[in-house]
Amino acid sequence: MSVSFDFKQLTERERYKLMIGTIIPRPIALVTTVDENGRINAAPFSFFNCLSADPPILAIGVENNADMSFKDTGHNIRMTEVFTVNIVSFAIAEAMHVCGAKYPRGVDELKEAGLTAMPGEKVASPFIVEAPAAFECKRHVTLELGRSRQIVMGEIVYAHYRDGVVDPERLHVDPAAVDAIARLGGDTCATIRDRFEMLTPKL
């Protein structure tokens, strides 16, 4: 016996609950941006993933405010055309959570969370020193999904890795050193510490 749902008959909140509880685990992007005056903003997004290597494209889903105005991240990307995705490790999970609080515009979430901002190499937005990896991005295209959400695709133009995370010769990234966390449903998160190998079958 199965349970089925017609998504056309569900509310936005009901669809959201089913989707975030089922499409798991979702990596977390701690996105740093700056506004027109150079003020830093940081916010976490679990509607996030990589889409392409040629060109190198990642995407984040950015929700608007209830009145359909842009939140800080969406506003800043629209004004500056750049953003930086910082990968969230278990070590900075609590700090990431602090950045997710609803601060007034202009508050530096990184300072509130005790994280260290370093100037970007190619873009105006900073990267986070404590993050295991960070991707500096230039906005590639923005998709407007109705009035409530934007999908922002960014082209990666520069990458930062904390020492010991990547082999600079082989370009092998050590998943244990990244120690990333992911969002499940509701307030539940997970680590990637349990892993197994599955080789691609050869015909």
Image (tube, grey):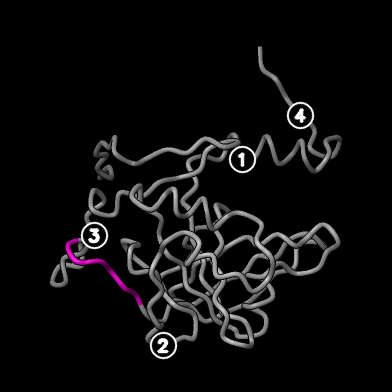
Judged from the image, the secondary structure of the residue bearing numbered disc 3 is loop
Is tag 1's residue or tag 4's residue first in the polypeptide sequence? Answer: 4
Q: Residue at x 17, y 62 (%)?
A: 164
- Name the N-terminal-most of marks 1 and 3: 1
* Residue 168 position in % (x across, y down): 16, 71
Quadrant location, the N terminus: top right
User: Given the image, on which type of amino acid does mark 3 rest?
Assistant: Val
Q: Which comes sooner in the sequence, label 3 or label 4?
A: 4
The magenta segment: 159-164
Residue 182: horizontal and vertical position, in percent? 45, 45
Question: Type of residue at label 1?
Answer: Ile
Q: What is the distance, in whole Å, between disc 1 and disc 4 at their CAs?
A: 15 Å
Residue at (29% x, 39% y) in the render: 193
Upstream in sequence: badge 2 or badge 4: 4
Which residue does the numbered mark 1 point to in the structure image? 20
Quadrant where the image shows the C terminus: top left
Residue 26: percent from left, percent from top: 50, 47
Q: Nearer the viewer, residue 74 or 150?
A: 74
Tag of residue 5? 4
Three-letter code, disc 4: Phe
Which residue type carries mark 2?
Lys
How far apart, in angstroms, are the residues tagged by discs 2 and 1? Answer: 33 Å
